[in-house]
Amino acid sequence: IFFRVMEAGRMMQGCPVAGSMMYAAGVLGALYVVLILATIQSPAFAPNSLWTQAQHVMVAERSLIGSQTRDILYTPSLLQRPRPHVPWHLHARGAAQPDAPLSRTSAPRDVLHPFMKSVAQRLIVAPIILAFLGAIVGVMQHVRTSRPPSVASYSLFSADDIDLRYGTGVWATTAVVGEEDGLEEMRLTKRIDGKGMAQEITAELKAEIEEMGGPAPRLVVVEVGDNPASGAYIRNKQRAAEHCGIDSSVIKLPNTATQEELLTTVSELNNDLTVNGIIVQLPLPSHIDATVVTESVADAKDVDGLCCSNIGKVALRGQRPHLVACTPLGCLEILKRIGAPLRGKEAVVVGASNTVGIPMMLLLLQQGCTVTVCRSDTKDTASHTRNADILVVAVGVAHLVKEHWVKPGAIVIDVGINAIPDSTKKSGRRLVGDVDFEKVLPIASRITPVPGGVGPMTVAMLMKNTVQATRAQRGHLE
């Protein structure tokens, strides 16, 4: 009971004073119980136990009945003699009744005798016992939050099209996930459906484009080389553009194209008044400086939001950037659509890249969060993430974040996309995030899966930036 009180106090993040008091009460209560256990008398030797009373009766009556002692044990009336009341604390200390006959067997003996004869010894051993009990509770808690083998084949992304709503779960660590129904319910209530949100945004943008009128917004993607992963990303962007009503096209340059040729292509698109958005698909071949190329895109057409001017204006109060980086903007949109309170919250961003980490930090600062950024050289990153109400992870390391990194009830946004071997898949690989989804799921209040989380929202924000850029270029920006 006291350990559960401690757990409840630890999870009362909204009221730290009451939570601390409850936690302290649980600690003191557990310690008190251990001290009582350390000083209690063994029932077999306590002078007021039933067996000792029977022995007292036998000693008292032996001289009268001689060899018939055996019959006394079967005479209830002899064991029902009135005894004076003795307070419970005297029982615990082994105090004999005033009229109880003394016998060799009635000497009080402690359960832990002879290791704890003095109070000092008890005070030393009692915390050790408490720590041992705490370790047992910890093991039990780990078992309760581990994924059972019986649900190993459960399809993680079987509910991509379900529109989910926000709900907190600060008691996540007490959830029983040992049954399929419990785990499925946890997935449905905690999993953030980025794909469903992206579909909603697509419908909103389509209506906005129809309302705006005129030619459809035009988006051009510049691709260098033949990277299969880049090709897949471009096809996703083209499908999303088609659903929104955006005219998209791709300019492909060979892998041997020089940096000057690429810059010339970008310059021509900057000067083309029919082009509203420009994307240079990353990564670029090693002989091309990606930073130089990114900076060559006109600010008003930089729908990726990666040029220094757009990122810099996010950092300055009172400045409004033309466009914001798509992935951080998608993360912020997720937080807003699930109704997550941001002002005054502790946010931790793991990863300090120019495309995600830095702009994400700036956006969270704008929303009133206290933000900590963890880099690859940060010491004990887990000690920072455990304080986060909002945790954004973007480092590109599969399953980096485990359950002990996450504060109970935190909102976890997993940006990473990593391919790991999986013999059950036709391709022999599957996509996972930087967060160990299965282990963190019982701890977090909401969490984005990979795939189906931040990825679709990044593409949706690209479409939103394209529409916004079109409005600005046509003079319709309010």
Image (cartoon, rainbow, N blue to C red):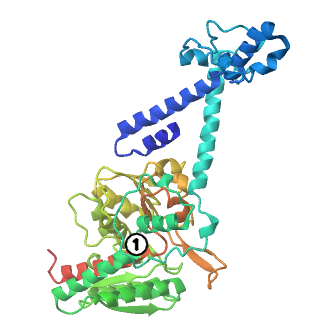
Residue at the (53%, 67%) spot, across then down: 396
Q: Which residue is drawn at 61% across and 29% down?
A: 127
Q: Residue furthest right?
A: 67
In front: 25, or 180?
Answer: 180
Locate the C terminus by quadrant. Answer: bottom left
Label 1 crowd (10 A; few <14 / some 14-19 / many >=20): many
What x and y, as percent, mark residue 27? Answer: 51, 33
Residue pictured at 75% horizontal, 19% vertical: 72
- Decide: is 18 above or below 192: above
Q: In this view, does 21 lie above or below 66?
A: below
For residue 354, which quarter of the picture? bottom left
Between residues 27 and 2, which one lies in front from this camera angle?
2
Say if residue 36 shows up in the picture.
yes
Residue 69 lies, in percent from the top left, at 80, 16
Res. 294 in view: no
In the displayed structure image, the side of residue 123 where residue 22 appears, left or right: left
- Dividing the picture into quarters, in which one does residue 459 lie? bottom left
Give x and y (percent) for residue 327.
39, 71
Provide the secondary structure element on which disc 1 rests: loop
**In the foreground, 173 or 334:** 173
Residue annotated with mark 1: 193
Q: Which amino acid does label 1 sit on?
A: Asp
The image shows residue 61 at horizontal and vertical percentages of 75, 10
